[in-house]
Amino acid sequence: DIQMTQSPSSLSAFVGDTVTITCRTSQSIGTYLHWYQLKPGKAPKLLIYGASGFLREVPSRFTGSGSGTEFTLTIGGLQPEDFATYYCQHTYRTPPWTFGQGTTVEIK
Amino acid sequence: EVQLVESGGGLVQPGGSLTLSCEVSGLNVGNNYMNWVRQAPGKGLEWVSVIYRNGDTFHADSVRGRFTISRLSSQNTLYFQLNSLRIEDTAVYFCTAMLSGADHYYAMDVWGQGTTVTVSS
């Protein structure tokens, strides 16, 4: 099974800051890596697919990069609604399709 | 608009059973990869099970042999049969669809709101 290592587990930032979350995998997965946002009591939301794929409904301040075993999610200019928990997940080949441990972004 | 609506959660004793349902609208449950993902209290997301378009199924080691994913195309509904439930199965269970398939590298494009399963004596 592919192991996911997501860091940091939490971070504090001000509105307007730029933050970066990292996800590393135990073996190369090409770009079969996705990022999700989770807020309490709400359905999780897909932010980035295929490591860097944009979705029309997601604000452009969310960008993803990477391939192979190292990936990043960058939020450029945090907004109040961005304070949430973020997860990476791989869907490389056959399951299990593991999630990272999550990163909670809190207001400083 | 695509919508996934889960139901069937509740309180059950250890060793008991429960059937979760996910009513799907806006897409054909038989033509998409459909998953169950769960989140235990205070924990992260855990992928649990998938059913492929061709009917193949996969389950996480933690539930294999106890949980079964299935679908009924005539009802456009995804099901999750949970048997031999354990306290550690307590979680919110989400139904998800890989709507864009290979175009989105099999990302989970659509999620339901979740249904809560509590296993306790």
Image (spheres, rainbow, N blue to C red):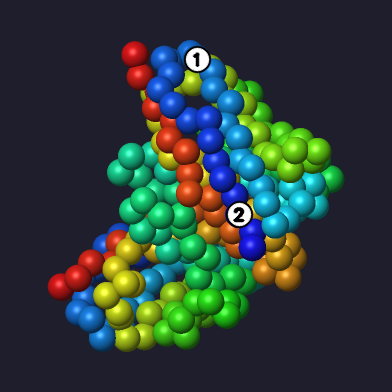
Identify the residue at image location x=52%, y=80%: A65
Q: Nearer the viewer, residue B66 or A24?
A: B66
Callout 1 amino acid = Gly
- Residue A39 lies left or right of residue A25; in this view the side is left
Outermost residue on the left side: it is A108
The chain carrying label 1 is: B
Q: Quadrant of residue B40?
A: top left
Q: Nearer the viewer, residue A78 or A29?
A: A78
Callout 2 amino acid = Gln
Alpha carbon separation for disc pair 1 and 2:
29 Å
- Point out residue B107 in the picture as x, y percentages from the top left corner: 62, 62
Question: Quick check: can you spot residue B68?
Answer: yes
B52 up-or-down from B61: above or below: below
Q: Mark 2 sits on what residue?
A: B3
Secondary structure found at label 1: loop
Question: Quick check: can you spot residue A96?
Answer: no
Q: Mark 1 sits on what residue?
A: B16
